[in-house]
Image (cartoon, rainbow, N blue to C red):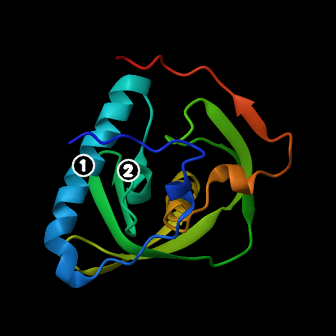
Amino acid sequence: MVRKILLLGNEQLYEVSAEVDKKEIGQIRNIITDLHDTLMDYRSRYGAGRAIAAPQIGIQKRIIYMYLDHPVVFINPVLKFPDNEMIEILDDCMSFPGLYVRVLRHKRCTIEFRDLDWKQCSWDLEGDLAELLQHECDHLDGILATMRAIDSKSFVFKEIGRAKD
């Protein structure tokens, strides 16, 4: 089911999400379906969107759904950083379409997480994927890109595809 994406300023976006317990895995599958449907709807409306975190649809659980060429579910992800090399990017978010924020992110990271089979996984990431998953993990901790702005001049509005009603 397509869910409403919470927008910048909604207090729920600033809450820290709870970890998923293995006993909840059956319920998680319904949440994943909603995350998928919501992400695909956003893509059809705006022509953008690679991943979504559960808090963006009002579910305060540590779940990220990513769809690039196939779906990947990250349950209880934890980021680790092998070094301090940073990259400056313009970060965007489905919770504030059209607003880009200049932020610093780690160039590389490792993400450890559980998959839908509750298997422990670990991926080493660099560049775009590292940036994307740092952004999504921030959502799980109640942090938005606007809170990571480099300075007060780090905000840029860009025209986006017009939302289809």
Disc 2 packing (10 Å; few <14; some 14–19; many ≥20): many
Callout 2 touching callout 1 (CB < 8 Å): yes
From this viewpoint, which residue is outermost toward the right?
Answer: 152
In the rendered view, tell whether residue 165 sits above or below residue 149.
above
Judged left or right of residue 140, residue 38 is left
Badge 2 or badge 1: first in the primary sequence = 1
From this viewpoint, which residue is outermost toward the left?
Answer: 26
Is label 2 in a helix, a strand or a loop? helix
Disc 1 packing (10 Å; few <14; some 14–19; many ≥20): some
Query: Pointer 1: what residue?
Result: 34
Is label 1 in a helix, a strand or a loop? helix
Query: Pointer 2: what residue?
Result: 57
Q: Quadrant of residue 73?
A: bottom left
Residue 162 visible at all: yes
The residue shown at (73%, 32%) is 156
Marks 2/1: CA distance?
9 Å
Q: Quadrant of residue 42?
A: top left
What x and y, as percent, mark residue 31?
A: 24, 58
